[in-house]
Image: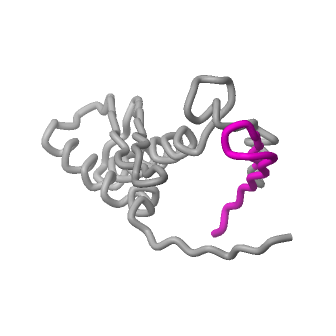
Amino acid sequence: MIRKAKAVWYGDGRTGQGDLTSDSGVLSSTPYSYKTRFENEKGTNPEELLAASHAGCFTMAVAFALQGAGYEPTELNTEAAVTLDPDGQGFKVSRSALTLRASVPGLDEATFLDLAHGAEKNCPISKVLNAEITLDAKLV
């Protein structure tokens, strides 16, 4: 399975702007810029999208883990808070803090914590945060 998204950028880093489009169309020329990333202008940014990806991936992993253990959640509510810190001349994502609130009938706390920790370790987005990165770059 391969999923794709595209970024287009016009101008320099601080005053330029761009847009993001996903093949599914959920993101369609969604604006992003210095101001949407480092200030609070309306639009999105890579860290917000990473947080949404991590929250969604992790929550689905918890749902599958619960299902495998014979439980059906009433609700799983996750927030991912991604931290962007200075790193030399650039930046790095230093942390993704997951907060899960769940309603699961008949499930004890110890089993819940075990399943949630397993999901955190095994969701693909958790794994990609320490993945090898490849690059195919060309000037056009």
Q: What's the magenta region?
A: 1-21
Residue 2 in magenta stretch: yes
Residue most extreme to the left: 110
Q: Nearer the viewer, residue 10 or 83?
A: 10
- 85 above or below 61? above
Residue 104 location, x and y as percent? 31, 33
- 43 above or below 133? above
Task: Please report the residue visible at 39 percent of the width from the left and 64 percent of the height from the top.
Answer: 130
Task: Please report the residue visible at 40 percent of the width from the left and 40 percent of the height from the top.
Answer: 83
Residue 5 location, x and y as percent? 72, 56
- 131 above or below 106? below
Residue 39 location, x and y as percent? 57, 27
Question: Relative to residue 28, is residue 73 drawn left or right?
Answer: left
Total numbered labels: 0
Residue most extreme to the right: 140
Task: Please report the residue visible at 32 percent of the width from the left and 29 percent of the height from the top.
Answer: 101
Residue 112 in magenta stretch: no
Residue 99 location, x and y as percent? 33, 34
Q: Nearer the viewer, residue 15 or 134?
A: 15
Question: Relative to residue 129, is residue 2 drawn left or right?
Answer: right
Question: Relative to residue 88, is residue 113 drawn left or right?
Answer: left
Q: Quadrant of residue 107?
A: top left
Task: Please report the residue visible at 68 percent of the width from the left and 24 percent of the height from the top.
Answer: 42
Q: Nearer the viewer, residue 12 or 20?
A: 12
Q: Quadrant of the N terminus?
A: bottom right
Q: Quadrant of the C terminus?
A: bottom right
